[in-house]
Amino acid sequence: MNYRHAFHAGNFADLVKHGTLILLLDALTADAAPLTVVDTHAGAGGYDLDGELARRTGEAAQGVFRLMAADDAPAAFDGLKAAVRRGNPGGGVRFYPGSPSLIATALRKGDRYVACELRDDDVALLAQTLAPFHGATAVQTDGFAMAGREAGKGGQLFVLIDPPFERGDDYARIAETMAQVLLLDPHACIAVWLPLKDLETFDAFLRSVEPACPDLLVAEARLKPLTDPMKMNGCAMVIANAPAGLDAGLTSVCAWVADRLGDAGGKAEVWRTGP
Ligand SMILES: C[S@@+](CC[C@H](N)C(=O)[O-])C[C@H]1O[C@@H](n2cnc3c(N)ncnc32)[C@H](O)[C@@H]1O
């Protein structure tokens, strides 16, 4: 495993993923039922954008730095902007929250968060990030398997799937995991982050998931036309059992990212699969 999220923290794809994540957490925690969150690929928990790894790529310059400086960001980004400000009490944008910080902060009394990470270095950082949060646990284990183990235990279940896509079987394992979780808990909300490289790969993934989840909410932010399959031309969130009322927020998140961070061929679209 070579992937380290520190190289990419706070980039445009994180804005789409984390903007969506906060909208989902707001909706799920509005329901009184206790919530279990499984973060199958949690990473380090939070990131120092002034650190060596983040500075080597500079991806946050076309991501969270632009968002925090913008005066035209939609209200759907308010939660993420507030989280960034909380992480930088002295001002500036040095520390960026990963999905674990965002999820752990949203937990209510009685909610649980299982954050899975395989790498020794990142799981150690993850454990540090989560130490102050009651109900949140860092586990060094395969997140796909953990999602299946947590399904069907009662209460609300939310699974975030955010693999590095450095293995050839990541798409197949996502589809298998979604099917397994939904078999055990047909109401589980599952949100998957995907890179958009070419349409064929994305369509094939949606078709592979369709038998188990015929009704998906799909939010796409394309920075450019999907003509070069070797590049990440955009990204998407694909959500099973999305809570009601999410579409407008997702549309404004994706539209801002595509318009402000993409080129002239960029576009955003939020749509549903199924009949
Ligand atoms: C894209 S990063 C996660 C970023 C994180 N979700 C966030 O938004 O802050 C993917 C992480 O998954 C870890 N990983 C890869 N395969 C895994 C697996 N099967 N189970 C758990 N973690 C895995 C990688 O080491 C990497 O840290």
Image: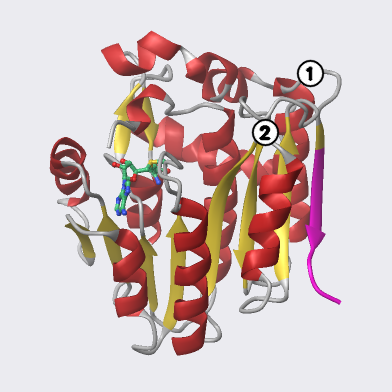
> Residue 34 lies in what quarter of the image?
bottom left
* Residue numbers of the magenta segment: 268-275
Q: Characterize the magenta stretch by its predominant secondary structure.
A: strand
Q: Going by the image, does 236 lie left or right of 245?
A: left
Report the residue that reaches farthest toward the front.
Answer: 168
Q: For the image shown, how many numbered marks are present on the structure? A: 2
Residue 146 percent across, percent down from the top left: 29, 69
Is residue 201 rendered magenta in the image?
no
Q: Going by the image, does 84 lie left or right of 74?
A: left
Q: Is residue 88 something one can see in this rendering?
A: no
Q: Which of the labelled discs sits on residue 263, or is there none?
A: 1
Under mark 2, the amino acid is Gly
Who's the residue at 53% across and 18% down the image? 65
Q: Which residue is mark 2?
A: 234
Q: Going by the image, does 151 lie left or right of 188?
A: left
Residue 215 percent across, percent down from the top left: 73, 74
The quarter of the picture where the C terminus appears is bottom right
Under mark 1, the amino acid is Asp
> Residue 161 lies in what quarter of the image?
bottom left
Residue 107 percent across, percent down from the top left: 36, 64
> Residue 144 lies in what quarter of the image?
bottom left
